[in-house]
């Protein structure tokens, strides 16, 4: 259950404070969409959204690009109901599209350890796309366990637990329009 109190929320008994408000997020998503529109002018890329977290970011991104594009989804699991990744990536839903000789942009909500993104890039490269790039809302460089090349990054953030704008805590909080960071003081 989410309980909102001003600029904070309580989710699963823990308090989170606003970290990035919806206006800041929207401006940055528009910037990324502008860059993708310029870089892929004359091409029709396919956006591969990573479920469940990236669906809001992907929807907003697609509304702002000014080029023809397609969309597909894959779903992975590495968290379960925990706040930290298990480090083990499992594919729960495969893409349906044939991406051979296509320009592919992987859209992810957050990259922390980099293990999931590393797995995704290796897996999709096996399908021989014309190009393979990434658009990531959040990156936690201090949490990285592997070097992953990220092409379009919304925000580089601290290695703290965040929720909202598609990101969840045990499946709760995805609907929040702002991004919240766990408040260690709990106040």
Image (spheres, rainbow, N blue to C red):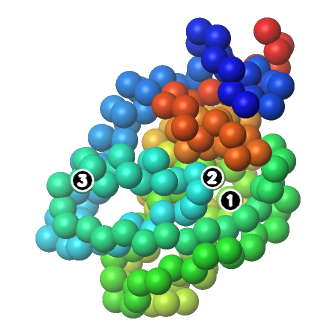
145 shown above or below 88: above
Residue at 55% over, 32% down: 176
Instruction: Identify the residue at the far front of this view.
Output: 1
Left of 139 or right of it: where is 183? right
The residue singled out by tag 1 in the image is 114
Q: Quadrant of residue 79?
A: bottom right
Residue 49 can be seen, yes or no:
yes
Residue at 48% over, 63% down: 49
Please state the horizontal and vertical placement of residue 186, each as a whole percent of the image: 82, 15
Q: In this rendering, which labeled residue sits more in front, label 3 or label 2?
A: 3
Instruction: Kindly check if marks 1 and 2 are in contact, taking CB atoms under 8 A apart as contact.
Output: yes
Q: Quadrant of the N terminus?
A: top right
> Residues under labels 1 and 3: Cα distance?
26 Å
Nearest the viewer among 81 and 87 is 81
Residue at 73% over, 41% down: 169
152 shown above or below 179: below
Left of 80 or right of it: where is 119? left
At mark 2, the secondary structure is: strand
Instruction: Identify the residue at the far left of this view.
Output: 42
Instruction: Kindly check if marks 3 and 2 are in contact, taking CB atoms under 8 A apart as contact.
Output: no
Give me the disc on residue 65.
Answer: 3
Residue 84 can be seen, yes or no:
no
Residue at 79% over, 9% down: 187
Give me the disc on residue 111.
Answer: 2
Q: Report the number of numbered marks.
A: 3
> Residues under labels 3 and 2: Cα distance?
22 Å
């Amino acid at each position: 259950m989410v309980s909102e109190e001003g600029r904070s929320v309580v989710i699963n008994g823990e308090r989170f404070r606003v970290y990035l408000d919806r206006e800041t997020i929207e401006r940055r998503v528009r910037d990324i969409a502008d860059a993708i529109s310029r870089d892929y002018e004359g091409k029709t890329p396919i956006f591969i959204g990573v479920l469940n977290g990236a669906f809001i970011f992907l929807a907003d991104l697609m509304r702002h690009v000014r080029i023809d594009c397609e969309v597909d989804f894959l779903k992975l699991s590495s968290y379960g109901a925990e706040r930290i990744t298990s480090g083990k990536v499992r594919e729960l839903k495969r893409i349906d599209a044939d991406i051979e000789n296509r320009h592919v942009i992987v859209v992810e909500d957050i990259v922390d350890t980099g293990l999931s993104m590393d797995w995704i890039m290796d897996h999709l490269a096996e399908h021989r796309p014309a190009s393979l790039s990434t658009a990531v809302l959040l990156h936690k460089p201090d949490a990285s366990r592997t070097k992953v090349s990220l092409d379009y990054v919304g925000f580089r953030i601290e290695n703290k637990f965040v929720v909202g704008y598609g990101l969840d805590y045990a499946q709760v909080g995805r609907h929040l329009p702002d991004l919240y960071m766990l408040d260690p003081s709990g106040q």
